[in-house]
Image (cartoon, coloured by chain):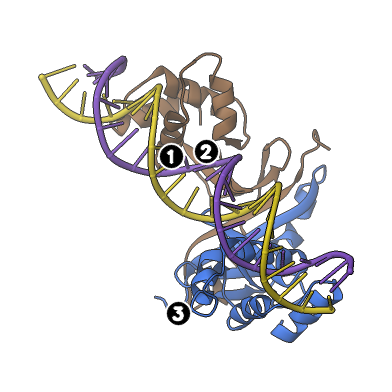
Chain colours: A brown, B blue, C yellow, D purple
Amino acid sequence: MNVEQALALLKEAGYKYTDKRAVILEFFAEQDRYRTAKELLTYMSPNFEGISFDTIYRNLHLFDQLGILESTELGGEKHYQMCCTHHHHHHFICKKCGVTKEIKGCPMDSVSNELNNFMIDDHKFEVYGLCPTCQ
Amino acid sequence: MNVEQALALLKEAGYKYTDKRAVILEFFAEQDRYRTAKELLTYMSPNFEGISFDTIYRNLHLFDQLGILESTELGGEKHYQMCCTHHHHHHFICKKCGVTKEIKGCPMDSVSNELNNFMIDDHKFEVYGLCPTCQ
DNA sequence: ATCGATGCAAACTCTTTGCATAGCA
DNA sequence: TGCTATGCAAAGAGTTTGCATCGAT
């Protein structure tokens, strides 16, 4: 997803356009990589002196809800990245730089028949390690 | 793993036997279910009036290190359960009661050749939903 | 003009740590 | 006796919330 698509989704849902939101979206559109609230704040601080964690957290939460960002929890901290595609997939995640690589296939395909009496409503499959650059 | 095995591991590693540790281990040995520090404290409070979170957290961390407990992070909170077996496996986890069911097979078997230049050192596969009892 | 967005401050949750004391070996 | 375990208190990190003001539409 690029910035324009994200802004369109925002507008569609009745939310306002602000410079801060635009910069947040630019930050995530730059790379396919999981990032934290702290990293976003660091990125924005030079241009928005008074930027606060409140705004960051509120927008990350909103973007997550709207399907603009996807999130995962790593080491007790929420990480976000731009939603890459609309089809279901999972990721390799680099522990050092947060870069992600899409993994083909979903383990649920071969699992659901093992859990006949269970109501499945979610699952998580993530592979962690170091990307070629960080090794 | 049962309480005796866990206490043996503790002793082996040079740690002391205390009533609190015994009760913590009994709590986890009772059921195959992920539980939080808070739930453990609630369970212990009636019998140990002065029991503190410090002791709970310190022991959970220790037991995790020693391979007595296994842990996962759900909703920003660490959950622990007694290590069920020694072979590699994954879990279905009930969102309501925390009960777990072992899933056969590991998705990594069919994934590692997709990530040739990546150094893989960990992965997480969990299925969430409601167990038959909680539906 | 209206209603959402933001900053400020405070609070909240989960967890960790320093230090003195209590307790196992 | 010696060293670990524990409780107390405080602090820390990440996150959320109430309220007044600012700003987009």
Residue B93 appears left or right of B6: left
Q: Secondary structure at mark 1?
A: helix
- Where does residue C19 sit, x and y in percent of width and height? 70, 50
Q: Is residue B79 above or below residue C9?
A: below
Mark 2, other Cα within 10 Å: few <14 / some 14–19 / many ≥20: some
Dot 2 corresponds to which residue? A83
Could you tell me residue B32's position as x and y percent? Answer: 60, 78
- Looking at the rendered structure, the secondary structure element under dot 2 is loop
Give the residue drawn at x 79%, y 50%: B120
Chain bearing mark 1 = A
Say if mark 3 contacts mark 1, CB within 8 Å.
no
Which sits in the foreground, B43 or A24? Answer: B43
Residue at image location 52% in from the left, 22% down from the top: A26
Residue A3 seen in this snapshot? yes
- Where disc 3 sits, the SS reads loop
Quadrant in the picture for the C terminus of chain A: top right
Quadrant position of residue A81: top right
**Residue tagged 1:** A61
Q: Is residue A105 visible?
A: no
Mark 3 = which residue?
Answer: B132
Looking at the rendered structure, the kind of residue marked 1 is His
Type of amino acid at the residue the image marks with label 3: Pro
Residue type, mark 2 in image: Cys
x 85%, y 72%: residue? B14
Q: Is residue B27 above or below residue D11?
A: below
Question: Mark 2 and mark 3 in contact (Cβ < 8 Å)?
Answer: no
At label 1, counting other C-alpha atoms closer than 10 Å, the crowd grade (few under 14, some 14-19, many 20 or more) is some
Marks 3 and 1 belong to one chain: no
Q: Earlier in the sequence, mark 2 or mark 1?
A: 1
Left or right of A79? Residue D15 is left
